[in-house]
Amino acid sequence: MSVSRPARRFALAAFCAAALGAATAAPAAMPAWLARWLDPATAPFIPVPEIDVDPNSGTTLGLIPTWLVTDDKAQIRKIIAPDVIHNPNFGWGARGRIFSYPSDDTQWSLVAGAKQRVESEFDFEYQTGRMRDQRWSFDASVVYDRSGTPRFYGIGNRSPVIDETNYTDQQKYFQTTLGWNVTHALQLAWTLRAREVAIQPGSLAKIASIQTRFGGLLGVGVNHEVLNRFELTYDSRDDLTIPHRGGAYTIFGGIASREGILNATLYSVAGFDGRQFFRAGPDATIAAHVALRYMPGVSNVPFWALSSIGGDRSVLGEDQPLRGYGAGRFYGRNSFSSSLEYRRRVLSLDAMATHIEVELTPFVDVGEVFAHSRSSPVSQLHKIAGLGFRGLAPPFVVGYVDIGYGSEGAAVFTGINYPF
């Protein structure tokens, strides 16, 4: 299940806090009530400091009191993690989060919150049929997200930093995916998304608003989109959350219209997404990812619907990572992206009533956007090298910090689930 921006910012900090608590015994002379609160095995909750660094939003600081609910096998079944945060651009804020894993086959999450200025969010996601053991699988998302951090530099693979602008992105959408499991490995899926996108003036000091530099840009203002996309996937991974071997390969194609299913077309899209995993010893996995996205036929495409690379997340059929730049750093009609990671387990311990593993992950990303389908997708690649730190609570939870370096300097990202 893909996880949207507001839901992703606490997991690895929780694992690090648990590891610290497990490794540091409370002094014998410490009062019993204080020792109980500082011991992850007995504390009513874990007070986790939040430090979120993002190349677009800057540094957000806060505190997350975190409750973990585990089963008799010490596997996490629910995470409850409200927080109080402060961002220099948007002021104080608060969020509530629940991540629930009632079974291997079903997951759901709920995130809601707001800051003093500009930003607010609501995100409910539900997924069942994950294991593909039944005939049908089903995902659904209901999202409202108002973000003041997005950047736009122009369209093209060489859009210059000097053209940086900011805008407020307000989105409301419902998305559902219905998958027909032809076999355990082969699935045919249909994705439907109804979305309203409002691109409003930016709110960040010292950065020009998008309307001042790109006033005639398609997609500014309020637009509506109805997306219909079909995906054919062959998936042989040994695990959906923490894979060590096998692969997932998807070809997809679809259209998006302004209203309804067959009205004026906004754009069409087609492409390929492939992920492959190899065991490299008992404690290591090599993970590879490649994605190619084309937008044939239609010329008048809102900028936010174009192919884009940048940021830390791979979204099937849409945005792709380039972890030395902020999200959406490069926009173009077509895109290519590829990543390679070496995931090495370096620590394993029991804490917070569950089992936790820590991985060290060097990685490389490459990618580019290009205007014409006849152009080479690898002729002007942007290149990123970096190092990731991952906390795992098998079988459902992965948190990460990834630090990447490219031609515009370093970028730091945090989140839950692997980037691909």
Image: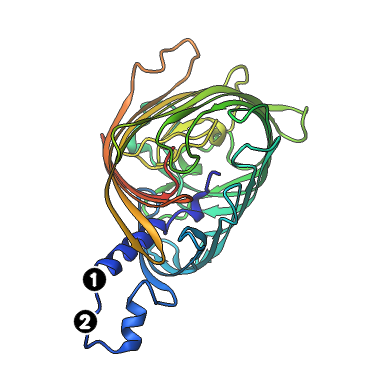
Tag on residue 27?
A: 2
Picture quadrant of residue 43 = bottom left
Q: Which amino acid does label 1 sit on?
A: Thr
Number of disc labels: 2
Element assignment for label 2: loop
Picture quadrant of residue 408 = top left
Instruction: Residue under label 1, please give it.
Output: 24
Q: Quadrant of the N terminus?
A: top right
Tag on residue 384?
A: none
Image check: 161 left or right of 74? left
Residue 414 coordinates in the image, percent (x, y): 38, 51
Residue at 61% of width from left, 31% of height from top? 184
Image check: 8 left or right of 113? left
Element assignment for label 1: loop
Q: Nearer the viewer, residue 269 or 37?
A: 37
Spatial separation of the CA atoms under disc 1 and disc 2: 9 Å
Residue at 46% of width from left, 53% of height from top? 8
